[in-house]
Amino acid sequence: QRVRLSLDFSLIRERIVWVHQKYEEEQSGLLLPTKFLQKSMKPESVYGQLKEGFKLYILLKKLSKYDRGISRTFLDAHQETTVEPSVAEAFSFFDQMVVSIEVKVHDQLSIVYFPLHPGHTQLAE
């Protein structure tokens, strides 16, 4: 409950949707993999913004472990029919592109989340 009071989740949601929209705009002219690897990851670049989107989504994933309301409100929202299409698309995209592994350190199991960057998936294709 304290987490929801201290963070503006609507702003986080709006930013994730905005980042996804900017990425989709850029998607129509996606760079070739070799150029992609040379592409700057500066915050103002589309790929820098995508990196921010991944960080925000991963933050929500981590917080949802402690507050199930976060998961119901944000992470599972893209599965509901009442959600705006732009929100559903954005969260579905990040849900597909963020994966996790379990790591055992000092007899404690931890979940590590990381993005599958779209440029890397194209390299495999």
Image (cartoon, rainbow, N blue to C red):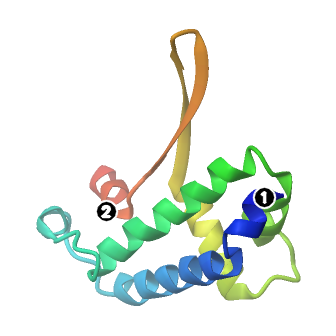
Packing grade of label 1 (10 A; few <14, some 14-19, many >=20) is few
* Left or right: 91, with 50 as reference point: right
Which residue is found at the position 16% from the left and 61% from the top?
37
**Direction from residue 83 to residue 96 in the image, left or right:** left
Where is residue 98 drawn, in percent x and y? 53, 53
Residue toward you, 33 or 46: 46
Point 31% across, 55% down: residue:
120
Number of other residues with Cα within 10 Å of mark 2, as a class: few under 14, some 14 to 19, many 20 or more: some
Specify the amino acid type for callout 1. Arg
Is 69 on the left-hand or right-hand side of 62? right
Image quadrant where residue 94 sits: bottom right
In the image, 45 versus 81, the foreground residue is 45
Vertical comparison of 103 with 14: above or below: above
Numbered circles on residues, count = 2
In the rendering, at what x and y percent does residue 34 appear?
13, 63
Residue drawn where x is 19% and y is 68% of the image:
36
Image quarter hosting the C terminus: bottom left
| Amino acid at circle 2 | Gly
Q: In terms of sequence position, does the residue under pointer 1 or pointer 2 come before the other?
A: 1
User: Residue, x 73% and y 59% (percent of image)?
Assistant: 3
Q: Which image quarter holds the N terminus?
A: bottom right
The residue beneath circle 2 is 119
The x, y position of residue 12, in whole percent, is 61, 75
Q: Does 58 sit above or below residue 91?
A: above
In the image, which disc is placed on residue 40?
none
What is the number of the mark on residue 2?
1
Label 2 sits on a secondary structure element that is helix
